[in-house]
Amino acid sequence: MTSRLFNIGKPLPPSPPGQGVRFDQPDWAQASPKLIREMLSRALARPSGGWLVVDASRHIASRPRHYVVAGRELVAWRAAERILVAPNACPHMKAPLSEGRVSDGKLVCPWHGLRLGAEGFGSWKPYDSFDDGVLTWVRFGADEASIDRPILAPRPERFIDGVVRVEARCDPSDVIANRLDPWHGAHFHPHTFARLRVTNLSADDVLSVRVAYRVAGPVCVEVDCTFHSPEPNTIVMTIVGGDGVGSVVETHASPIEPGRTAIVEATLATSDRAGFRLAMLASSVVRPFILRTAHRLWMDDVTYAERSYAARVRTSAPGVEG
Ligand code: FES
Ligand SMILES: [Fe+2]
């Protein structure tokens, strides 16, 4: 039995009759493993240009930072207005450059002081990287050079953003599969979602969801949103009805190494409410709230994705029945 909820957000029209999912069925029956697997394999087949998210651009400052993406050790730093992402091993004697410092935009090696920049040094040179204003991306090699920028879903014009980065013992596909299963929402995150119904599944794999976010007890804000995957390592939630239309939550999964993934989730919140301008001014206060909510949800979803990965690895182990 569902207890009564009070929506303090903008009222929503009745959901249109849905397509593509069996609405009369309970959530566990609608969450068909076959359907989720098929949506996942179509998402993984989309082009990406080889771009992978490294981190929030805000996190990369004038101090060099160390990352591992797709098995490569990287150093990222901000040189004047630009972010550079390069191999972490110094071309001289392989010192870890992330332990060096930045001086006049150059990365200075901690062992013998070699100064390195965008021009490179011998075979050492920065990788292609792209700062989209919120996130920094990197790509290795130019096998998909025709896509010269990461594929992004539409973002709101003005927003308050918060970016959370967590690591999980799973593959990127486990993270995307988690988000292609919205049916778990109210069951697995009852602290955040009071009610969640999938209302439509379009032919191009856009899932529509009506979800009531808990404010306190039975008081909630109900919104309509969609989930879609614009490229293989990203899934985007977009609010399309109710408060905050145009707000997005981008979940990016970058491989660290097999069985380890960095989840970088960017929330870009917008609103046409008058108070939002004030909130924009106070974004340093609002941002921690966004981050705390995203982090709590991700602690749950990391558990889900790690469980899926572990179950998959175990069943595919030699001598184990699948
Ligand atoms: S190892 Fe970097 S300058 Fe020698
Ligand atoms: Fe979840």
Image (cartoon, rainbow, N blue to C red):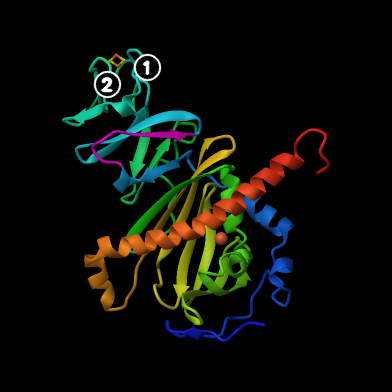
In the visual, does 27 lie left or right of 176? right
Give, as a single range, the part of the protein colored magenta.
Answer: 60-69
| Residue position marked by numbered label 1 in the rendering | 94
Q: Residue at x 34, y 48 (%)?
A: 132
The residue carrying mark 2 is 110
Which corner quadrant of the figure contains ligand 1?
A: top left
Rendered location of residue 101, percent (x, y): 24, 28
User: Can the viewer see residue 155?
Assistant: no
Foreground: disc 1 or disc 2 = 2
- Position of residue 249 relative to residue 11, above or below, is above
Give residue 14's quadrant in the image.
bottom right
| Neighbour tally class for label 1: few under 14, some 14-19, many 20 plus, Cα within 10 Å | few
What number is the disc on residue 140? none
Could you tell me how far apart the alpha carbons at marks 1 and 2 are, in whole angstroms? Answer: 11 Å
Q: Is mark 1 within 8 Å of ligand 1?
A: yes
Instruction: Tell me if residue 312 comes above or below residue 246 in the rendering.
Output: above
- Looking at the image, the residue that sits furthest to the top is 93
In the picture, which quadrant includes the C terminus? top right
Mark 1: secondary structure? loop
Q: Quadrant of residue 276?
A: bottom left
The one of 46 and 172 positioned closer to us in this rendering: 172
Return the x and y of residue 142 as percentages of the image width and height.
45, 31
- Quadrant in the picture for the N terminus: bottom right
Between residue 65 and residue 83, name the one nearer to us: 65
Q: Is residue 23 left or right of residue 218?
A: right
